[in-house]
Image (tube, rainbow, N blue to C red):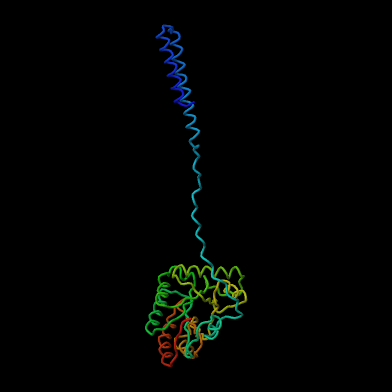
Amino acid sequence: MEVSLVLERLSGGLDRLRDEAGEGTVTRRRLLTAVPGAAGLLVLGGAATAGSVSAARPEHTPRATTKPRTPPKESAPAKPPGLPTQKKPIFTLADYRRMSSAPPFPTDAVALTIDDGPHPIWTPKILHLLDKYHVPALFCMIGNQVLGHEQIAKTVVGAGHQLANHTWSHPTKLAGKSGPQVAKEIARAQAKIQKTTGYAPKLFRSPGGDWSPTVLREAARAGLLPVDWSTDPRDWSRPGAPAIEHRLMAARPGQIMLCHDGGGDRSQTYTALKKVIPALSAKGYRFVAL
């Protein structure tokens, strides 16, 4: 019921009471019963009005709740794409170019590779020698040798040299191990070298040049090219600096030379390289990076 209608009825009722009072016919009982009735109409009118207002107001609907967004998980570093499995490793610069699609090397080029480091004594000495003659080299690093010699490994990269994966623990008979064992040796070394230096090796050298179809396959799966050598002075056996020098001087253009900066006392290697590097440069040989 509208408020205006209630008020109208109430007003009419009071007017009748006045008229009756004027005529002397209204009684006290009549007056008492009229007032509550009018009050009741007001109450009903208010309730009706409230109901109409309530009906007109849209019902409150709770806001839809959404679950908080879960931050995306960090994806693991992507594994390098696998490479075709090679039937044999790289022995010469021509092999390297064929397997890697690298640009042609100069006809007088040779490459120097240095294995088994980093070493706290011999690696810095050899680095100084290479810097003196502006010679790039490939350092084939062992994972557990990088462990504990991180700063030296970083210095090698900082000097502009390349790194190769030379397994985690340098097992002497890698070719006789199972696929998972070979894969673990490669993966652990790769992870340690890259984490320490920021350089991801692209080449893998099996300890002692010990290759097998399994080793070649696991290297390819890791995205690494297998690299060997064509000139071995056997400096690891410490035959004397003159013997190492003689064998290195027999290198021919296009060959890959092997030396060592780790695995023990490399004073003979260092002494031989002090003569071989300038002597080969004087012959017109050019040292190139792999």
Foreground pick, 124 / 9: 9
**Picture quarter containing residue 129?**
bottom left
Foreground pick, 140 / 35: 35
The correct choice, above or below, for 123 with respect to 42 in the image is: below
At 50% across and 33% down in the image, what residue appears?
Answer: 55
At 48% across and 32% down in the image, what residue appears?
Answer: 54
At 43% across and 85% down in the image, what residue appears?
Answer: 273
x then y, percent, for residue 123: 42, 77
Foreground pick, 111 / 29: 29
Number of numbered labels in the structure image: 0
**Picture quarter containing residue 79?**
bottom right
x then y, percent, for residue 101: 53, 81
x then y, percent, for residue 178: 62, 70
The correct choice, above or below, for 107 with respect to 194 in the image is: below
Q: Is residue 24 left or right of residue 72?
A: left
Q: Is residue 120 left or right of residue 252?
A: left
At 47% across and 16% down in the image, what residue appears?
Answer: 37
**Picture quarter containing residue 95?**
bottom right
Farthest-out residue, bottom: 283
x then y, percent, for residue 3: 45, 26
